[in-house]
Image: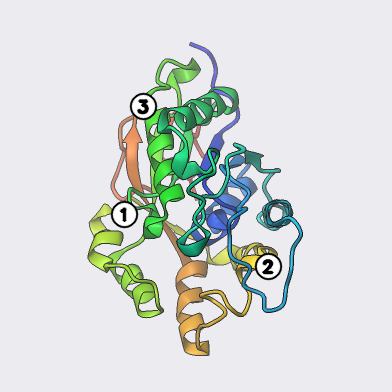
């Protein structure tokens, strides 16, 4: 049997800043443990909303690409990989007529790109959005579907393909907290029960990395953003959740689960021995 390569984690998300909010601390944790961390971003966030009053940007996609590269440096991981699709936008910014907007792309085509990346990167562990795409964004749902499908269609690759697929997991309590801060979502739909969370990563040691990564996404974290409009009390509560713990549920596995909850994303994964030991 072919020897496993360096322990590798592949994270697949839709827009610049998705990584900082949901998995930033986890990415830094594993990078410091010697894991090769690869972040794939489907778009450059071209249809995002600039949240800094009075700020104008000639090319928002180019600007947000630069922001993501800065965020990756803050998280101590390598340069991001772009899948070269376009941001679908939301509300009045929705790009119905853009053939490269994720919402208009055949999911099988997206799956093909993600599958090719898995073949190139050869990760043991893959992380992506939960089935509701965090808060229902169509691009998040497309990437969830494509990455899940690619996981299941890559078992023939060397070492048996990726061994474990995880979804970002927000508990009912956390979803309720976000709902109270202005997001129109049902916590019982967009959140998960405590028992669904298979891995809880304590990322408090990487709070400064995560803060720096969030700050790097300056066009998205200005005064008119959700974070920017929060009261000091709301922001404190949000930061306690964002900077303390990151949760994951199991989307798929090709290897036995040694215990539950797991000690980390590589617990029991061939090729990741020792990564999650104290």
Which sits in the foreground, 259 or 168? 168
Q: Is residue 112 above or below residue 197?
A: above
Furthest-bottom residue in this view: 232
Which mark sits nearer the N-terminus, 2 or 3?
3
SS at mark 1 in the image:
loop
Which mark sits nearer the N-terminus, 1 or 2?
1
SS at mark 3 in the image:
helix
The residue that mark 3 highlights is: 152
Q: Between tags 3 and 1, which lies in front?
A: 3
Q: Can residue 253 be spotted in the picture?
A: yes
Q: Between tags 2 and 3, which lies in front?
A: 2
Q: Residue visible at 53% across and 82% down? A: 229
Q: Where's residue 129, x and y in %?
A: 42, 48
Q: Residue visible at 48% across and 32% down? A: 110
Which mark sits nearer the N-terminus, 3 or 1?
3
Q: Residue visible at 72% across and 78% down? A: 54
Q: Along the horizontal axis of the image, is 16 left or right of 237?
A: right
Which sits in the foreground, 199 or 149? 149
Q: Judge the density around disc 3: few (<14), some (14-19), many (≥20) Cα neighbours within 10 Å.
A: some
Q: Can residue 268 be spotted in the picture?
A: no
Q: Between tags 1 and 2, which lies in front?
A: 2
Q: Where's residue 101, x and y in %?
A: 53, 43
Q: Are marks 2 and 3 in contact (CB under 8 Å)?
A: no
Task: Kindly identify which numbered label has been placed on residue 197.
Answer: 1
């Amino acid at each position: 049997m072919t020897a496993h390569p360096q322990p590798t984690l592949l994270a697949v998300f839709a827009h610049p800043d998705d990584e900082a909010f949901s998995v930033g601390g986890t990415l830094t944790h594993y990078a410091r443990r010697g894991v090769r961390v690869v972040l794939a971003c489907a778009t450059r966030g071209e249809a995002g909303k600039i949240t800094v009053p009075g700020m104008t940007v000639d090319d928002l996609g180019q600007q947000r690409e630069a922001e993501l590269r800065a965020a990756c440096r803050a998280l101590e991981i390598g340069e991001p990989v772009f899948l070269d699709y376009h941001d679908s936008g939301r509300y009045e910014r929705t790009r119905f007529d853009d053939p490269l907007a994720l919402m208009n792309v055949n999911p099988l085509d997206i799956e093909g790109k993600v599958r090719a990346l898995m073949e190139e990167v050869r990760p043991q562990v893959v992380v992506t959005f939960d089935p509701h795409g965090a808060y229902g964004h169509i691009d998040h749902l497309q990437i969830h579907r494509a990455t899940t499908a690619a996981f299941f269609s890559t078992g023939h690759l060397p070492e048996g393909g990726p061994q474990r697929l995880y979804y970002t997991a927000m508990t009912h309590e956390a979803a309720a907290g976000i709902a109270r801060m202005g997001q129109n979502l049902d916590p019982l739909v967009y959140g998960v029960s405590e028992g669904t969370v298979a891995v809880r990563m304590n990322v408090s040691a990487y709070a400064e990395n995560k803060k720096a990564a969030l700050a790097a996404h300056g066009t998205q974290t200005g005064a008119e953003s959700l974070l920017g409009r929060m009261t000091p009390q709301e922001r404190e509560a949000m930061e306690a959740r964002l900077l303390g713990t990151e949760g994951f549920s199991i989307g798929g596995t090709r290897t036995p689960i040694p215990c539950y909850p797991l000690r980390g994303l590589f617990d029991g994964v061939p090729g990741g021995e020792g990564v999650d030991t104290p």
